Amino acid sequence: MAAFPDEEYSERLARTRTRMGEAGVDVLLITDPANMNYLTGYDAWSFYVPQAVIVPLNDDAPYWYGRGMDAQSAVLTTTLPRDHILSYADDYVENPAKHPFEHLATVLKEHGRERARIGYEGNAYFFTARNLQVLTESMPHAKFVDIDLMVNWVRTVKSANEIEVFRQAARIIENVMQVAIDAVNVGTRQCDAAALISAAQIRGTKEYGGDAPANPPSILSAENAATPHASWSDRPFSPDTATCLELSGCRLRYHCAMSRTVYLGKPPADLLRVA
Amino acid sequence: MAAFPDEEYSERLARTRTRMGEAGVDVLLITDPANMNYLTGYDAWSFYVPQAVIVPLNDDAPYWYGRGMDAQSAVLTTTLPRDHILSYADDYVENPAKHPFEHLATVLKEHGRERARIGYEGNAYFFTARNLQVLTESMPHAKFVDIDLMVNWVRTVKSANEIEVFRQAARIIENVMQVAIDAVNVGTRQCDAAALISAAQIRGTKEYGGDAPANPPSILSAENAATPHASWSDRPFSPDTATCLELSGCRLRYHCAMSRTVYLGKPPADLLRVA
């Protein structure tokens, strides 16, 4: 079962197809996991192997394409017709002699896409240089078009369903940030604070559980406060130091982010001035 | 400060350079975050923007290349000379008019690499199709060579330092799995079990804290037990169901994994037979 009602996905697809028409592509190959989830509901931790959602310009339902063992997650989390859930055999995985997207090319050709204009997400991470190379070599008569952030732009318009889920994520982060502020104390190990924060993120509220946010808790203390993306350590928080907390609540993959700074001791005048 | 002593990184570089010589490349462009960490110690959550470690075949120290705001993490987590920490301005980030790897190409040319044989990781996720396209267009006289898993193969030989860290990760997962088995109970929400598991992973042991593992806890209960990579939900665990737990302990980015299955009730004969 997908996270949202069928009409939500129909509406998303319709808006995507309007842009496909404008861009002159016959079929989209969506590989950004967030965009795959947006268009079909697909939700599983499988991005580490090649996978895609194939969106035809016509009214046909999209296709999910991925590793065989993950096809069951497509059955469980999407409302795609069973015969639109396609997959490759496990001997394609990490095999230097053959690549899953060679198989995908065969599938696309079987679907009459041999000479299609195929849109791909050229700068989406997980869409590797090899992915494109294999596709272009396997389908010399197709035209590949980099559609960049097409689905991301469609996503900027949020539905009422989505806004409700954001509100749930907001309730989660309100609680998470309070847990974090309470956890940052002189002598507490940074990892122990991170543990409490992560637990609060995943536990969510009594009404709705949380997801693991896309990034681990950002807890930047002492010298690490000079950089935005360092990891926590197992050193204790020191007196007279600032700790930046950049955290989120996550519900059904929708994030609500919040940042706060905790100072242990009497903050210097410069810090108070910018507070 | 890097996680391991200087000699550890020197040895890793020496073994990498032997393979570079065999492959006939003058310089490596390493973009897999795990391989960047392996070669230099660099440790920050910054893979979502283009970044790289540049390894010259000669004895010169590697270069870190990434977003300006993350350069400070390179200062804090590597022992690279300051003038080997290079970065691009923030107006390159998500800018449709210019790409960070155009700037990287300029840097490589300034370092005399205009006609070099440059090895890249073609199937590493985060090395997008666009990354390669920008590089090849910006450096028409260079020869780009897909070195695939070169550094991953170097990594297969573990040092004494690494084995010690694996042992620490093993102590963490032993505790995590016990927490998990205790947490899976009829009526407990799956997300509440996940919260306890994540906290145990990050807290680590009294002696050494944990990192966030590369993947969130895999807690596959009831119908989700039929697929390997589903997410937990906020539904409670049901009686007479199997729950597969695929978890890890992580220390300094080194993982030790463990899988167990919990059955709530009297397991069916088939399950007992394979136990």
Image (cartoon, coloured by chain):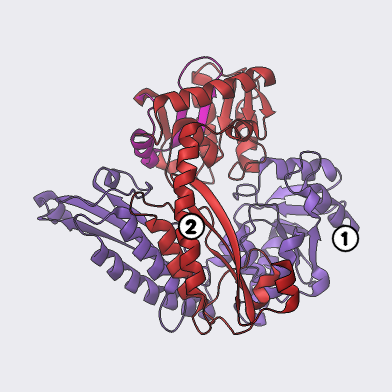
Chain colours: A red, B purple
Closer to us: B116 or A166: A166
Q: Are marks 1 and 2 on the same chain?
A: no
Q: Position of residue A161 (x, y in %)?
A: 46, 34
x then y, percent, for residue A135: 61, 32
Residue underneath mark 1: B111
**B48 sits to left or right of A10:** right
Q: Position of residue B236 (x, y in %)?
A: 25, 51
Q: Tell which subunit mark 2 falls on.
A: A
Q: Is residue B198 above or below residue A87?
A: below
Circle 2: residue type: Glu
Q: Nearer the viewer, mark 1 or mark 2?
A: 2
Q: Is disc 1 placed on a helix, strand or loop?
A: loop
- Please report the residue visible at 56 percent of the width from the left and 33 percent of the height from the top: A30
Q: Is residue B216 left or right of residue B35?
A: left
State whether residue A238 appears in this view: yes
Q: Is residue B255 visible?
A: no
Q: Position of residue A54 (x, y in %)?
A: 52, 27
Magenta span includes B184: no
What's the residue at 71%, 63% (across, down)? B70
Q: Residue at x 78, y 53 (%)?
A: B90
**Segment colored magenta:** A52-81
* Residue that badge 2 annotates: A174
Q: Residues within 10 Å of mark 2 (few under 14, many from 20)?
A: some
Amino acid type indicated by mark 1: His
